[in-house]
Image: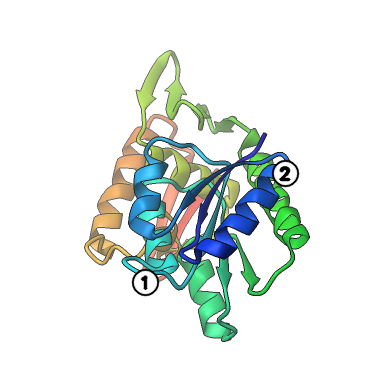
């Protein structure tokens, strides 16, 4: 049974959609605004989050930004009547996985929910990565080398995974900050350099592994 966090302030629509999803076998928790959604999220671990964009107290884009500070994995589907391309782009930049325009058919929402969950599950199915002479466990956030194990933070493990999955490519700084810290303006580029330095230190026992700073662009992980 897939668990859905559904955030919608239009109560009549929320009742119809929520009941329809439950009839199709989903477990649904409904919140009427972004603030309530964050409280529910602390106790409920959804497989997919469906967020209305236009809401009181906290709109869907702001809510997505707050969610991505604590949850980088769970897919987010935005619901909106807005049609401007800039709005679509903004939603994806804030960590959204999909977008459905109102009005919509419940069948379309179900297909999008199942697709988002399937894509995320497949992405995170691989738990262990061999990075040079290191072994990264992305479920337990452990980096092991020659009998020694380092406990990483969630962001450290996910960033190392991304750099390794795109080995030999430059991963843009903007992409890293947007993905792992949302729109947190406090987290400056210099802070990111410090963060990358910590990961380099973890990997320092294998001299073949290098994380190069491409000034003003991003970072590239290589293994000689």
Q: Which residue is mark 2?
A: 23
Q: Earlier in the sequence, mark 2 or mark 1?
A: 2
Report the residue at 29% width, 62% height from top: 184
Q: Is residue 153 left or right of residue 185?
A: right
Q: CA distance from mark 2 to mark 1?
A: 51 Å
Q: Position of residue 69 (x, y in %)?
A: 35, 51
Quadrant of residue 99 within the rendered picture: bottom right
Quadrant of residue 57 within the rendered picture: bottom left
Dot 1 alpha-carbon crowd within 10 angstroms: few under 14, some 14 to 19, many 20 or more: few
Mark 2 vs mark 1: give the one in front.
2
Looking at the image, which is closer to me, 26 or 14? 14
Report the residue at 53% width, 68% height from top: 92
| Helix, strand or loop under label 2 | helix
Q: Position of residue 87 (x, y in %)?
A: 51, 80
Looking at the image, can residue 196 be seen?
yes
Q: Position of residue 149 (x, y in %)?
A: 39, 19
| Helix, strand or loop under label 1 | loop
**Tag on residue 216?**
1
Dot 2 alpha-carbon crowd within 10 angstroms: few under 14, some 14 to 19, many 20 or more: few
Q: Residue furthest bottom?
A: 84
Q: Position of residue 146 (x, y in %)?
A: 45, 16
Relative to 160, does residue 67 appear above or below in the rendering?
below
């Amino acid at each position: 049974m897939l668990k859905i966090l559904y955030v919608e302030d239009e109560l009549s629509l929320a009742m119809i959609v929520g009941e329809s999803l439950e009839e199709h076998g989903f477990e649904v928790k409904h919140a009427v605004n972004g603030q309530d959604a964050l409280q529910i999220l602390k106790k409920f671990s959804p497989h997919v989050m469906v967020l209305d964009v236009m809401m009181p107290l906290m709109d869907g884009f702001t809510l997505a930004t707050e969610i991505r500070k604590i949850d980088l994995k769970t897919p987010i589907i935005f619901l909106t009547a807005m049609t401007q391309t800039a709005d679509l782009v903004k939603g994806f930049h804030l960590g959204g996985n999909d977008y459905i325009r109102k009005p919509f058919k419940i069948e379309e929402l179900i297909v999008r929910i199942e697709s988002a969950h399937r894509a995320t599950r497949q992405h995170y199915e691989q738990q262990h990565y061999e990075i040079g002479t290191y072994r990264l466990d992305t479920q337990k956030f452990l980096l092991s080398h020659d009998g020694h194990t380092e406990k990483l933070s969630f962001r450290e493990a996910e960033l190392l995974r991304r750099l390794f999955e795109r080995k030999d490519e430059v991963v843009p700084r903007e992409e890293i900050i947007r993905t792992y810290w949302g729109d947190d303006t406090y987290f400056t580029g210099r802070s990111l350099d410090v963060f990358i330095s910590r990961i380099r230190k973890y990997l320092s026992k294998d001299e073949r592994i290098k994380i190069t700073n491409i000034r003003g662009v991003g970072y590239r992980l290589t293994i000689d």
